[in-house]
Image: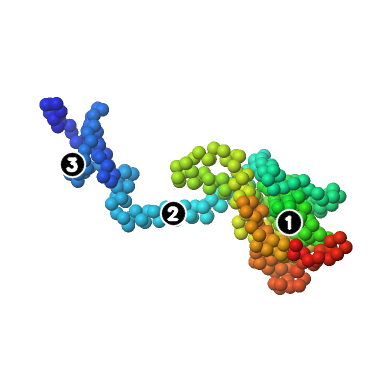
Amino acid sequence: MDSEGESMEFAAAELTLSPRLGRTVRVLRLPGEGQLQLADSPLLDQWLPTPSRIEGWADWLERRRSAAIGAGIATVLGVVLFFEFALPWMANRLAPVMPRAMERTISDQAMALLDHTQLQPSKLPAERRLALQLVFKDLTRGLPRELDYRLSFRDAPELGPNAFALPDGHVVVTDQLVQLVGEHEDELVAVLAHEAGHHEHRHGMRQALQSSAVVVVAGFLFGDLSGTGSLSVSIPVLLLESGFSRDHEREADRFAFGLLDKHRRSPADFARAMRRLSAHYGERDFGAISYLSTHPPSAERVEAAERAAGLAPGDPAAMPAPVERKGKKSSSGG
């Protein structure tokens, strides 16, 4: 090698050649601090073989379209499988060991958001609220998470009849749901049994973990981790926007049927409540509050309740009765 009129010789073992990467310039590193930038040539790899590195694999893929397409498909498939199976699996195992303080923090923040945007103080008589709270206490007595439960009420003119359970066991019922079932308290108890099922199976925390993990994984995949630093604040929002999966709903339904049977109540009460809610809402969209959008239910869930009660699908015994209002009978369809 000539440099300013001087001839310099190096042993091949002393030289390091950067791997080929597309059409980028190759860098030949000399002993010491020197280096040369060379146009790529097949001769370089013959003279100075380079060990296989990540860049070498990238170059190999770049020169083989089928391999690149296959790698892209494998990556997409891997991401789908991760979100579909691995993420729920991890959430299922993490949820039971999450500190109660974290469950309470997430729930309090979510409730504060709902109180600020969607809910108002309950207008139900205090005696009615207390009576329902005592019924709920009896319903949940002896459950593994019995000490977590607390039942409260909110007026929700925009959301309408609904009930939901937050990760810490706080179950909220809207005035509109109490008014919808009227004197048919057994139907409301059946709905509360369903919400207890969500809490016993930790669906709220599992959903919160999955929702927040999606943000973290997406940040790693797309190289933007700026939104992951405030997860403690954003988890309540993610929770409210995600809602429960169909599997979670079915699991909570099955729990409710068993709990009702244990208290000598019938799952037919749940079928009637779901039919009443379905008639009220029709095809209504809850918008951004997906956490509350599990009502109205699917026909599949209603039929499951009827089967659990030993009734045939559509049996008149599982049909909701009219609600008495101000001395007059009116349809429960709302």
Comparing marks 1 and 2, which lies closer to the viewer?
A: 1
- The numbered disc on residue 161 is 1
Q: Amino acid at mark 3?
A: Trp
Comparing marks 1 and 3, which lies closer to the viewer?
A: 1
Q: Residue at x 75, y 69 (%)?
A: 318
Image quarter of residue 53: top left
Q: Amino acid at mark 2?
A: Val
- Circle 1/circle 2 CB separation < 8 Å: no
- Circle 1/circle 3 CB separation < 8 Å: no
Label 1: how many Cα within 10 Å (few below 14, some 14–19, many 20+): many
Residue 93: where, in percent of width, then height? 59, 49
Q: Amino acid at mark 1?
A: Pro
- Front position in the image: 312 or 114: 114
Q: Secondary structure at mark 3?
A: helix
Q: CA distance from mark 1 to mark 3?
A: 78 Å
Comparing marks 2 and 3, which lies closer to the viewer?
A: 2
- The numbered disc on residue 47 is 3
Residue 57: where, in percent of width, then height? 32, 47
The residue under label 2 is 76
Image quarter of residue 212: top right
Residue 73: where, in percent of width, then height? 40, 56
